[in-house]
Structures are given as C-alpha cells and as structure tokens.
Amino acid sequence: MSAMPRWVALPVASLVLVCGVLGVQLANGGGTYEPLRPADACTERAVTSQVDGIDGLTENLVLLGIDGAACSLGVSREALTLELAQSGSRTEAEIDALREGLLGAVDRMKADGTLPQASDLVDEALDSADLNGLLKRAIRALPDSVINSALKTDDVLKRSIDGLDLRALLANLDDQADLERQVQQAVTAAVEDSLKARLTGLL
C-alpha cells in the first residue's frame, strides 16, 4: 500500500487537530455559547497601577471606587461604566454611589496598607506647584515625620473627593474608556491642589 501523498496528509492532519480542539471545548461546556458572567462588583479584587505617585494612587482609587458604586447600585462594574458613559443626565443615586464608592476606596486602601503616606507625594506635588523656589526648598527640608503628622493621605483624598463636581464631570464623557480617565484626572488635580495648599500652611 503506497504512502499517502504529502499534499493530502497535511490537510488531514490539520483536520484531526481541529476536531481534537473542538472535542475538548465541547467536553468543557464550550458548546453552550453562554456569555461569560460579569464579575461580582461586591467581591473585593486587587488592583495594581502601572504608574507610580499620585497618578498611580488615583488610578487605583477610581477602579476601586467604581467597583464600590456598582456594588451599592446592585449592578456589574461593566454595566455601570457603560451607563455612566451614555449621554444624558445622571441620577442622584448614581452620583451618590460614585462619591461613596470613591470614599470607601480610600478606607479600603488605608486598611490594606496600599495608601502611601503624604511625604511620599510631596516632591511630585511641589514639582507642579506655582511656588517660589525658596518655599519649595523649605517644604522639602521638612522631616517626613512632620509632614505625615500634619497631613494624612486619607484626609487629603476625602476632602478632594468631597469637593469634586461629579455631575459636571460625568456630563462631559465621550465614551466608556473616558470615564475612568476623566475621573482619575479630576481626582489627581484635586489631590495635588490640596497637598500644595496644606503644605504651604506648614511653614
């Protein structure tokens, strides 16, 4: 019996491989075509930013804050971000849930030790501050212990969040991806402004 020609053998081998993969998928429920269930927003998850400093802090804060808001509203995180990115006015319940979610995220980060001390954020805040060089040097010369006893990161964050006009912020979204970006930028700016104002008050 002659060997199977190579041009026939290759397609046959491919067909065998495809059938094998399909068999594994079907055996594991792949034939149901059911969509994956969204993650439960009330289940705590670890978030890790790819950047450091204030930007990384606020990125994690916003991700956890949206989880908290979705949990209190009884929806998935994906459903909430999609809803908030739609045009139209936001409900009081959505605004309140987002603010409470952000505030709750501060408490969670403080509890799990991922909230940096104020002294870790000073240099970055001063770099963008419109202060004279002498004042910046004086603030940088302050011991970390003095800064950390006078400034609590969780207090700075909560004051910043309380001062955000979330309704106006959510009215200017272009799409779903814009939600986290705009909220993060607003929180970052508020935190930097708060740090600058309170640092100058230490002298």
Image (cartoon, grey):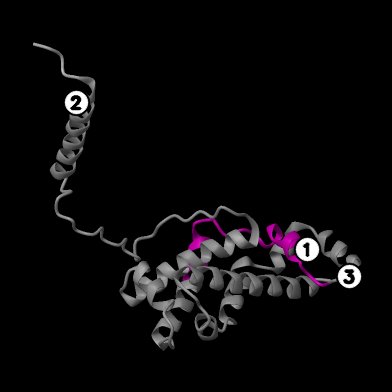
Give the image location of residue 128, x and y in percent.
76, 67
Q: Quick check: 126 above or below 52?
A: below
Give the image location of residue 120, x and y in percent.
69, 57
User: Is disc 3 placed on a helix, strand or loop?
Assistant: loop
Q: CA distance from mark 3 to mark 1?
A: 11 Å
Give the image location of residue 172, x and y in percent.
53, 81
The amino acid pointed to by label 2 is Val
Question: Residue extending furthest left?
Answer: 1
Q: Quadrant of residue 130?
A: bottom right
Tell me which label, 1 or 2, sits earlier in the chain.
2
Please state the extent of the stretch shown in magenta in the rendering.
104-130
Residue that appears at 51% across and 85% down:
167
Label 2 crowd bin: few (<14), some (14–19), many (20+), radius 10 Å: few
Q: Quadrant of residue 148?
A: bottom right
Q: Is residue 30 left or right of residue 38?
A: left
Q: Quick check: 123 above or below 157?
A: above
The amino acid pointed to by label 1 is Asp
The amino acid pointed to by label 3 is Asn
Q: Quadrant of residue 138?
A: bottom right
Question: Residue extending furthest top?
Answer: 1
Confirm whether the magenta stretch covers residue 187.
no
Tell me which label, 3 or 1, sits earlier in the chain.
1
For residue 8, the mark is 2
User: Is disc 1 placed on a helix, strand or loop?
Assistant: helix
Q: Main secondary structure of the magenta part?
A: helix
Q: Is residue 153 left or right of residue 174?
A: right
Q: Which residue is mark 1?
A: 127
